[in-house]
Amino acid sequence: MSQDRRQGLLEGLLEMFLLKGAFDWLENRFGFGRGCSCTGVIFGIIILCIALFLFCNIVTGTNFGKLY
């Protein structure tokens, strides 16, 4: 028997805290925190899209890797 594993509240909060920390570090290091340069804007948009994708994954509990 296989049961779907659902995350609890604390696990979701911890994942969002870690995502925020990683997002802030990446933004300051590579993204919009570098100023108004071309690479800062491009990497900032890429990092933002990835962070939004992961945030939606955490909030909804959907594993987009297993959709088929």
Image (cartoon, rainbow, N blue to C red):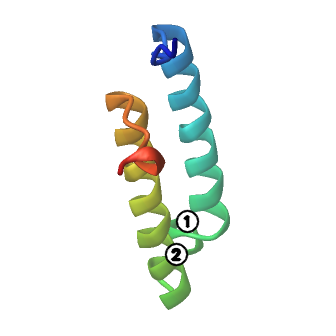
Q: How much space separates mark 1 and mark 2, taking CA atoms?
A: 10 Å
Q: Residue at x 62, y 34 (%)?
A: 18
When asked about the image quadrant of residue 11, the answer is top right
Q: Nearer the viewer, residue 2 or 39?
A: 2
- Relative vertical location of residue 34 with respect to residue 1 in this rendering, above or below: below
Residue 33 disc label: 1
Q: Decide: is 27 above or below 38.
A: above
Counting residues from the start of the chain, the first of labels 1 and 2 encountered is: 1
Across and down, in percent, residue 9 comes to: 46, 9
Element on which disc 1 rests: helix
Give the answer, above or below, for where 56 lies relative to 24.
above
Looking at the image, residue 19 sits to the left or right of residue 3; the answer is: right
Task: Identify whether 30 is placed above or below 49.
Answer: below
Which residue is located at x 49 percent, y 20 percent? 12
Q: Residues within 10 Å of mark 2 (few under 14, many from 20)?
A: some
Marks counted in the figure total: 2
The residue shown at (35%, 29%) is 59
- Secondary structure beneath dot 2 equals helix
Residue 6, image x, y percentages: 45, 16
Residue 49 located left or right of residue 3: left
Residue 43 marker: 2
Which of discs 1 and 2 lies nearer the camera? The answer is 2
Amino acid type indicated by mark 2: Phe
Q: Quadrant of residue 27?
A: bottom right
Three-letter residue code for mark 1: Gly
Which one is in front, 46 or 53? 53
Q: Tag 1: Cα neighbours inside 10 Å, few (<14), some, or many (≥20)? A: some
